[in-house]
Amino acid sequence: MAELVFDEDRNQWVWAAAITDVSGSAGATFTAAEQAIVNDLVAKVNAILAALRAAGKIAND
């Protein structure tokens, strides 16, 4: 079993250490459709990370 990590921001134990948000966006070498897909995935991954932080599952830092 994985060890818990202490989140100082919440003053509680969480399941995993902090995971940084995805940054950047798809470059011009992609088609418009591919850019939209990549940028949508970036937004969705960051939303998932925010939900996990809000639920106290991963650390905020």
Image (cartoon, rainbow, N blue to C red):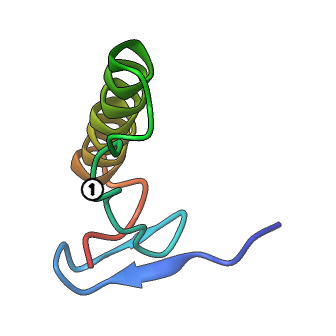
Q: Nearer the viewer, residue 1 or 27?
A: 27
Question: Looking at the image, which residue sits at the far left?
Answer: 9
Q: Using residue 11 as the reference point, say whether residue 41 is left or right of it.
A: right
- Residue for point 50% across, 80% down: 5
| Residue 36, quarter of picture | top left
- Residue for point 68% across, 78% down: 3
The quarter in which the N terminus is drawn is: bottom right
Q: Is 55 placed above or below 3 here? A: above
Q: Is 29 placed above or below 32 here? A: below
Q: Which residue is mark 1?
A: 24
| Residue 32, quarter of picture | top left
x, y percent for residue 28: 32, 40
x, y percent for residue 59: 35, 70
- Residue for point 27% across, 34% down: 43
x, y percent for residue 4: 58, 75
Q: Using residue 34 as the reference point, say whether residue 16 is left or right of it.
A: right
Query: Dot 1: within a 10 Å radius of its alpha carbon, few (fewer than 14), some, or many (20 or more) residues?
Result: few
x, y percent for residue 23: 28, 59
Q: Nearer the viewer, residue 54 or 32?
A: 32
